[in-house]
Image: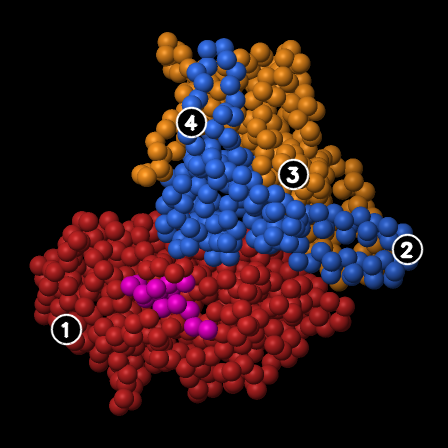
Chain colours: A red, B orange, C blue
Amino acid sequence: MSKLNETDIQGFVLRGYNLPFARHLFVHFEDTAKARPFIFRIIPEITTGQHWDNGKPDSTVNIAFTHRGLIALDLPAATLISFPVEFQQSMKDRAAILGDTGRNDPQYWDEVWRDDRIHAWIGINAVSADALDKRSAELLAMMQETGGATPLDSQDAAALVIDGQITTKEHFGFTDGFGNPDYLGFQRDSQPGQGKLTPEGTWAPLATGELLLGYADEAGELPIAPVPHLLASNGTFMVYRKLHQNLATFRSYLDTQAALYAGGKEKLAAKLLGRWRDGTPIELSPDHPDQAITQDPNRNTNFTYAADSEGTRCPIGAHVRRVNPRDAFGFQGRLINRRRITRRGLPYGTVVPEGQPVSDTDDRGVIFIALNASLSRQFEFVQQQWINYGNDARLGNDKDAIMGSHGGEGRFVVQGDTTPTNPPFVCSHLPNFVELRGGDYFFLPSITALGMIGLELVDPR
Amino acid sequence: MGNQNGKLYGLTFLSPIIDDEKATPSHDLQIRAYLATLPTDERSPFALAPGTHLCRLVVMDDVIYVGSPACEEHLKSKYLIFETNCDADPTSYLTGLATSIPQQLDAVWSHCIGYPGATNLQAYLDYMKACQLETTFFFAAVNDKSLPESLRALQTQRAVADFVANHQGLPPAQLQSEFKQFLAELNSCPVPRAGIMAPVRDIKTGGRNE
Amino acid sequence: MSNINGKVYAMNCVTPMKPWKTPILRLVFFLLWHIKSKQQDLINLSFIEFARWVIIPRTSFPFLANGQRKDELKYDYLLFFSNFNGTWNQYIDAFSAVLSTGLNLIWRWSEKFPGAIPVTLFKQYIANCQFDTDYYYTAYPYATANDLKAAHIVQASLDQLSQHADGTPEQFAAAYLQFMIQVQSHLGNTGAAPLVC
């Protein structure tokens, strides 16, 4: 395969920045004639995939567009209709397909996400709150000067600080950040378990085209992409979802169920997710967390489910097993390879330690961001078939315990054995622990594509 | 090989449709119009007649032109395809249809060439035999359970899932007595109706949180 | 949509074959039928409830006289009927990813078949050869092939447990634990399918 041109790809795609502060700006283009120069003006600000030989920058900037944003930028009609139908429709209009019903229905979303006015996302990541504010002010000033974009909303997110330490935890107490896939050509420390399974039982990177348009994908072809090639290449599609977390409900449900479960509260939490709260995979260490595994990049995501087909170590419906079944569906994992996504996101809202009062109405949750070459084949499929449904895992209509839109009627089975501390156990009447408050689909273009858009040089053929 | 896999039969019938340019709408369109309003749920004729797991009716207008260098050719008749996955051999199955749902069969097949009607059983069977194609290869995921067995098992599965969820952490004696009651109720339930979208759950499983 | 009923999708495809190739295909099906291991992949994909292939030799379209005009065809035809769970894209993606050799063995005798890999051309071919179902009935619209298999396992386990219903409470509790372990990965709820459009 060809070597990646890292200066043409937005850095957000190639690596997680590991910067603890983020601000997501959502903007509207009032006037095409002013919007294009604004795009062209912002290009030098965009963080690319170039290596940081002099250490991390204080802040990074990236940009992506909704389909209505591309329409507002007056791209040619033939180009606009060549985008995938799900991107054209927008995530809100796909709610029924995604299972975003009940409490997740768009009628409950934040107003800005119900309005259909968001044209672009500008994502700022920073090393400190000050750096975040400074960069943000510069961009807002640029918008003001050019008159090219109107800010509609701003969403902050930040790594949770617990006991004075920056962590990778989310609000339910689970440690996040494992399992982003490896792709061919990406300069990133590869960890066994992140890629795809080989017939020999080792791990190999996924084809580049599963994430980046314009490169060979796992099906042995170039992924379906909008025209022209130059607009799509080195770009990708982004999913943004604001996931509110009902922390009070989660804690009280866990406490109530744990009182009935012989393995105890921490084990039950681990069974729901598939990892102990410190990040230890329950498949590798079913009885207790083990930091020796968690801290070792060669081990912390290096496992398969072949020896656990009954789910007695990691339940068949556990979250990590649902979203990445690895070899659990047979065929050496080949049914999974085209269903992977790259996640970038941070929690939002204040931390509340265990035992202290907390309310579901507090504003906290996680900003979920996924990147993939095909929204419908990757993100949408996982959401529709593996999170809000269970047939592929042979779990019928059962939804993901943590993410599913249960409406108070969900069920989660912890498969067990005759060991007294690992009994079969059923959690019933699952409520919605997570509620969708908004989001959409974005196209994250290459630097070249940004130039084409800014200079009105997009030719469909 | 062919029409049978385990206990299941895969029967395929192609019936040429009457081609009468004086008929308005044409016979194939009349079949389509009728099928469009025919219920596909528990009121389906195939739910009323015995033995059908899954079946379909398709009007095949023509064969397909896949593009040059393949040749273009056309069928001289349209055909009504009846593909069925059922519990019984052709004679028993078709007899079941003719005796349970003769009106619905007539409504569809009266538009087909040479159809004698479902009332004269032998003529009907002879007609369907003339229309029957040999299924070359038939695959069935579950090939050893009849329809009533499958419907009953599905009901059992739902009831058991509820029972297990609602009877955790009970003392053995109570668990046992509630189980026996549950079993008695489940066994006295009729086999659920075929074709119904959401089977009605009449069984109370008792226990916590019912 | 008439191709879908509950959790199952009815696909109909017709493809032309040069008559000299038909005996080869018959041999392929014969081997597939008698060499059970070759069917294992199909069974493991577990989202097909029923599927069939029907070869119609060019002279074998049913002819009932009574004014019917007799067909004069160059090609034999291969009819394919599938009853599968999941979406159209999911179904074809899965076959292309893991069963391409088997698919190629069956369809390479059909004119202009492009091969099961890469998947986009394959999907275009299928879309061209597929025709829609006018009426689709299933006796269990709320259940997939997996749900059915789970149901039969639960039924068999329950029948077995019933035989221990009259022991001492402790004996029963032990049998019940064994029963739970047998059925614990087969208790998924049944109901409506995810919406596809």
Q: Is residue C196 left or right of residue A397?
A: left
Q: 10 Å neighbourhood of mark 3: few (<14), some, or many (≥20)? A: some
Subunit under mark 3 = B
Subunit under mark 1 = A
Subunit under mark 2 = C
Q: Is residue C182 left or right of residue C90?
A: right
Q: In this figure, which residue is indicated by the disc labeled 2? A: C167
Q: Tag on residue A141?
A: 1
Q: In this figure, which residue is indicated by the disc labeled 4? A: C73
Q: Which residues are magenta?
A: A204-218
In the rendering, at what x and y percent does residue A450 appear? 18, 66
In the rendered structure, which amino acid carries the disc numbered 4?
A: Leu
In the rendered structure, which amino acid carries the disc numbered 2?
A: Gly
Q: 10 Å neighbourhood of mark 4: few (<14), some, or many (≥20)? A: some
- Give the residue displayed 51% in from the left and 57% down from the top: C98
* Residue at mark 4 to residue at mark 3: CA–CA distance: 27 Å
* Residue at mark 1 to residue at mark 3: CA–CA distance: 75 Å
* Residue at mark 1 to residue at mark 2: CA–CA distance: 80 Å
Mark 1 element type: helix
